[in-house]
Amino acid sequence: MYNALSLTRISIVAIMLFSILATIALLPAPSSAASGNAIVNIKNSIDRVGGGGGLSNTPLEEAIGNLINIFLATLGIVAVVIVIYGGFLWMTASGNPEQVETAQTLLIQGLIGFVIIALAWSIATYVVTKIGGAI
């Protein structure tokens, strides 16, 4: 029978594999060099994606707003993973009261974290909007 440590390892490996597969699935398809000028195609792709590799014309307030959004989105993903892991622990507890208690604690902490992240996002959006109308 599986113990809690091996189930944790299995779930971590499953999450890593899912992340890798999702990343591969979301990657853009390689562009065709059928036009005969692959360097021009690469340069055009770079210009479309990164603005030619130079500094962008994005205002500072908007750049700060984007960084805050990325950071809070990452924290939101972590909170969702914690809630999913807590639910997984609860479903696999098999009547073990210690594991159920751990799962309930994780669920509560994950939900509280998600509420804090949502409030932080709303406050940051309000502040950045009032400062420079960025978000």
Image: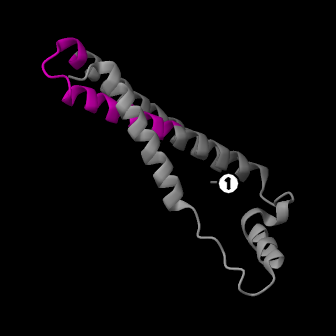
Q: Is residue 123 above or below residue 6?
A: below
Q: Residue furthest front?
A: 1
The three-letter code of the residue at mark 1 reads Ala
Q: Position of residue 52 (x, y in %)?
A: 83, 66
Residue sitting at x 78%, y 55%: 59
Residue sitting at x 67%, y 79%: 32
Q: Which residue is mark 1?
A: 134
Look at the numbered disc 1 and give the secondary structure of its residue.
Answer: loop
Q: Position of residue 97 (x, y in %)?
A: 17, 13
Q: Quadrant of the N terminus?
A: top left
Q: Image quadrant of residue 135? A: bottom right
Q: Position of residue 31 (x, y in %)?
A: 66, 75
> Is-magenta flag for residue 87?
yes
Nearer to the camera, 97 or 16: 16
> Is-magenta flag for residue 8?
no
Number of marks in the rendered image: 1
Magenta region, main secondary structure: helix
Residue sitting at x 22%, y 26%: 90
Residue bounds of the magenta highlight: 75-100
Q: Is residue 97 left or right of residue 35?
A: left
Q: Residue furthest top?
A: 98
